[in-house]
Amino acid sequence: MLALVVPTLVLAQAGDAITPPQFTDTAEAKRFHALTEELRCVKCQNQSLADSNAAIAQDLRLEVLDLMRQGKTDAEVKHYLVARYGEFVLYRPRVEPTTWLLWFGPAVLLLAGGFVVAGIVRKRSAKLPVAGSARDEDQEW
């Protein structure tokens, strides 16, 4: 029974091929590709809108193209998508008070780690005996 059902499911999914959008000129195509590379797929999370094969990514690509053809600028298209899906849709979120932790958090952690390592090294170096002390003179070598 499974031998009959599985090939049918595979064929049904193969028919859902994504058709690429048709561009009016090369400038529109370049702008579209640049814009979709800067936007994140809301389902895949680690892929750009251009790279994702998810159904929602296809819908968003068509929506981006539609907004472009309505005369919207890149900033307006991004603002529209951010209003609908949040800052997450941008690969490079804006530097705002709500995203300071995202932008500056790694640098703060790196600096804190550097101070911790420096403190550990200072404590260990303070515990080492000083060269030329009485103990070293008692050594035969």
Image: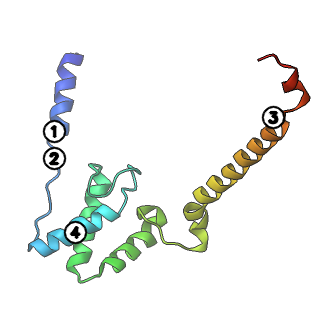
Q: Splitting the image into 4 quarters, where does residue 12 fall?
A: top left
Q: Amino acid at mark 3?
A: Ala
Which numbered circle lies on residue 32?
A: 4
Spatial separation of the CA atoms under disc 4 and disc 3: 68 Å
Q: Which mark is residue 119?
A: none
Image quarter of the C terminus = top right
Q: Amino acid at mark 1?
A: Ala
Label 4's element? helix
The residue at which mark 1 appears reads as 14
Residue 130 on image: x %, y %: 83, 36
Q: Tell me the residue that label 3 is attached to.
A: 131
Cβ atoms at labels 2 and 3 below 8 Å apart? no
Q: Are marks 1 and 4 in contact (CB under 8 Å)?
A: no
Quarter of image, res 135 = top right
Mark number, residue 17: 2
Residue type beneath disc 4: Phe
Residue 3 horizontal/vertical position (percent): 19, 17
